Image (spheres, grey):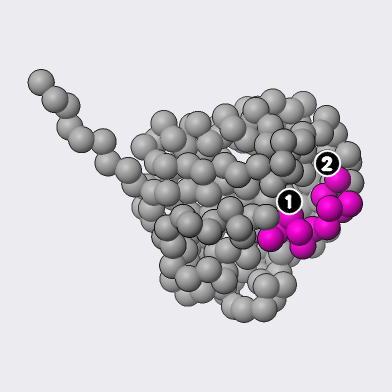
Amino acid sequence: MVGPERVVMAEVLVFHHAQGLTDGVRGFAEEVRRGGHVVHVPDLYEGRTFDSLEDGAGYAQEVGFGAIVERGVRAAEGLPKGLVYVGFSLGVLPAQKLAQTRPGAAGAVLVSACVPVGEFGTAWPADVPVQIHGMDADEFFAGEGDLDAARALVADAEDAELFLYAGDRHLFADSGLPSYDETAAGLLVQRVLAFLEKHG
């Protein structure tokens, strides 16, 4: 007997953080796949990973943040328009740019970072829902303006949610890093899966 046909609810493009395409980022993508979704996870670092956030950020600076963003934009070429874009930290840059400027986005999930919408020369699209996640005492997210940008986006967008988690860890959702917070990461995954079920 053939079981019920599996329904794919969303197609998702996930961008990794400054330490590269780590096992933890791949693990997140696999959790989303288990939820019934198609997930693409491009490697913006062309095979490189870094043991520290500082080294990874240094590499991104050396390559150029604009070049990293353009690698992300190119990764979307050939994929359907109706994607949900997910970015972790550095990966928020291409995710947010694509959600704002590539027509047909189904949604965006921004983790541990958010830039002012004016950075990409356009307002946040009215028909693109967004979730933003970060720790309330993260020196980068809460201390460098990202939280302010997130609050401004949530205030202006029609369908936007900001989730703050107690703690000071930046890459709290990467299960392969010392900064991993199992409780917060588990809640994040639940919320992302609910978002994809609703908007995919």
**Residue displayed at 17% across by 32% down:** 4
For the view shown, which residue lies furthest in the bottom direction?
122
* Whether residue 68 is visible: yes
Q: For residue 144, which quarter of the picture?
A: bottom right
**Vertical relation: 124 (above or below) 20:** below
User: What main secondary structure does the magenta stretch of the protein show?
Assistant: helix
Query: x%, y% of residue 75?
Result: 58, 53
**Vertical relation: 31 (above or below) 84:** above
Say which element carries label 1: helix
Tell whether 176 sits left or right of 36.
right
Tell whether 26 sits left or right of 143.
left
Residue 96 belongs to magenta span: no
For the view shown, which residue lies furthest in the top direction?
1
Read off the magenta span: 59-70
Identify residue type, mark 1: Leu
**Residue displayed at 64% across by 30% down:** 24
* Whether residue 187 is visible: no
Query: x%, y% of residue 114?
Result: 69, 59
**Residue displayed at 67% across by 78% down:** 121
Q: Quadrant where the N terminus lies?
A: top left
Q: Which residue is mark 1?
A: 90
Q: Which residue is mark 2?
A: 56
**Residue displayed at 77% across by 34% down:** 49
